[in-house]
Amino acid sequence: MNQFTYAQLPTKVVFGAGMRSRVADEVDALGCERVMLIGTGSPAAAADEAAVAATLGWRLVAHWTEVVQHVPAELAERARELAVETDIDCIVTIGGGSSTGLAKAIALTMRRPIIAIPTTYAGSEQTTIYGITGERHKQTGKSADVLPKVVIYDPELTVGIPAFVTGPSAFNALAHSVEALYAPGCNPITTAMALEGVRAIHSSLAQVMASPADVDARSDLLYGAYLSGVALGQTSAAFHHKICHVLGGTFNLVHADAHSVILPHAIAFLSPALPREMALLAGALGGEPAGALWDLAVASNVPTTLSALGLTEADLQEAAERSVAEVAKIAAPGNPRPCSLDDMLALLRAAFAGTRPTVETSR
Ligand code: NAD
């Protein structure tokens, strides 16, 4: 018999090709008229960003294009200064998790509503989680003030994302859904969304990598990423995410790349402790999860070795020590299998070498 609590987060979603044209209507519907637009700074995204700026018209009072993953604290301070100086009453973001993350840092102190137009699959737009990075450490927290009021998903905006961003970003989304199966706060509703998210990503990623301009496949991938973001937002970061946060926050690895490398190995380690969840995941992935995730990574041409991301063998000890410390802070059930320093070192060594993971059959 099911017994659970489920608190739906109050975000309005507008989904579909061309829906970016609705942005000014959504600003008006919130009763706002002084918008700060946060973009990506990427030349490849400049035309789409300029079009959204034009749609906002007279409402646009500040335009910020400098974003950095994991939101350095000094960057957040400078962006907040502009937001205060220009007296904004709304933030519109168009870009990936770094753009959304900077908006969240502003909303955290100024309590201004965010309208997010995500152009990667990171999922930050569906969560109350914020992260700000100081001296080699990423501090994360949760606040209802940072949850976007409106999210506009427009797959046409994603066709220009380069393959080296698309693939790992899809793995970032996959990681949200996979971990939502056992993360603190999981329940039958989040499990249903997570499994649908995994199916949508698994069935569309190869097609998107082969034909990046296929808007139908991009739409399916974005839908999967949306569901995965909700699954993360309704649960919590767990074992795998904590390792990725160490690799990003301490060693400055690209966030999405760390997900694509670590996910198969984290799941191989946790699998013996999660028979029910792994059976569900196997159904969505069409096979044993750790191996299926690794095969998808190889087929999608995403990074599969930590060495390729710039980590050195000498970094592994510190990465393992920090990861064990972070993982130990997670509430049950997000940390389903005790992980010693030796276990973590073995996991990171396998990820460093990039071997196909195998799952222990007995514990
Ligand atoms: P990102 O925002 O840095 O974007 C990755 C790359 O894609 C960048 O080079 C960017 O310029 C490029 N890009 C984005 N849109 C583009 C477009 N339309 N055309 C061409 N290039 C484009 O990275 P990300 O992976 O989206 O987000 C990572 C950040 O988000 C990390 O800091 C991570 O911690 C955070 N995050 C937070 C949450 C949360 O719930 N708070 C969830 C997931 C990720």
Image (cartoon, grey):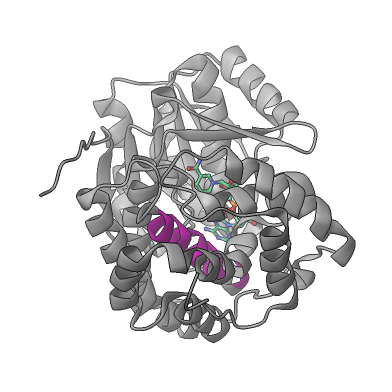
Q: In the image as oriented, which residue stretches furthest toward the left?
A: 1
Name the residue at the front extreme. 363
- Expressed as whole percent of the image width and height from the top left, the position of residue 169 reads 53, 62
Up-down: is 141 above or below 178?
A: above
Q: Residue 317's quadrant in the figure?
A: bottom right
Report the front residue among 168 and 237.
237
Residue in the picture at 68% in, 49% down: 323
Helix, strand or loop for the magenta stretch, by majority: helix
Camera-side residue of 112 and 190: 190
Relative to 336, 262 lies left or right: right
Residue at far right of view:
314
Above or below, comparing residue 332 to residue 176 in the picture: above
Q: Is residue 216 visible?
A: no
Q: Is residue 281 left or right of residue 349?
A: left
Which segment did they paint magenta? 164-179
Residue 171 location, x and y as percent?
A: 50, 66
